[in-house]
Image: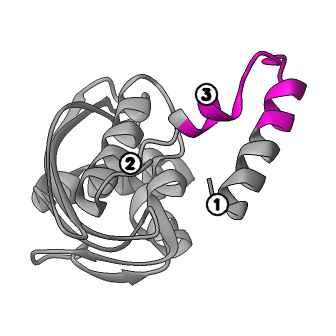
Amino acid sequence: MTRLSTLAAAALLVAAAFAGNVGATAKDVASTDPCAGQPAPICNKRIVEAAFAQWQNGGSGIFETLLSPDVVWTIEGSGPSAGTLRGRDVLVEAAVRPLSERLASPLRPVQQRLWADGEHVIVQWEGVATLRDGSSYRNRYAWIMRMADGKAVEVNAFLDLPAYDAVLQRGHRQLQRRASP
């Protein structure tokens, strides 16, 4: 172990002790690192697989887990939602929150396929959720992510934009009706 990894393992052992896992050893802590000794493509793929598994199993925070704060996210295609967003917070405000506000249940991936090549990971996935009116939202996505230091720094996102935009417009009309006297 290098000095830095020894310090990191010691810090994790202290945290584990406070969490009640006093039996953990430095070897146990090091073995939980999905990238320990792995080439970048394998490491990057494991990071994305773990984030999607957590999301699929009810976890939240996929964007905080997976994306760099300075991510450049491009929604490919044409229409009102296509374009490039700079920064994770901008992405969440401009593209994620408008959809999630119209959902009665969180969007969850129900299936995915992953490929890794060098610093890139491609994930093709299908997401489903229930809309506030009780109908279903279902969309297919492909995200091409360029990874650096365990986070996606560039993403090209492909999806059925008319389906996404229809939900936003339907929700917008409902919000307008509620606001009318």
Instruction: Determine the image quadrant of residue 95.
Output: bottom left
x 81%, y 46%: residue: 11
Relative image position of residue 147 (x, y in whole percent): 34, 69
162 versus 34 height, above or below: below
Disc 1: which residue: 2
Q: Nearer the viewer, residue 171 or 86?
A: 86
Near mark 2 (Cα within 10 A), the count class, few <14, some 14-19 or many ≥20, is many
Relative image position of residue 62 (x, y in whole percent): 46, 47
Disc 3: which residue: 28
Residue 43 appears in the picture as rendered:
yes
Instruction: Inspect the image, locate mark 3, and give the three-letter code of the amino acid beneath it.
Output: Asp
Q: Is residue 70 left or right of residue 6?
A: left
Disc 2: which residue: 47
In the rendered view, how is the structure colored? one colour
Q: Earlier in the sequence, mark 1 or mark 3?
A: 1
Residue at disc 1, secondary structure: loop
Q: Which callout, 1 or 3, points to the residue nearer the camera?
A: 1
Q: Which residues are magenta?
A: 13-30
Task: Please say whether residue 62 is one of the residues in the magenta stretch.
Answer: no
Residue at disc 3, secondary structure: helix
Q: Is residue 127 left or right of residue 89?
A: left
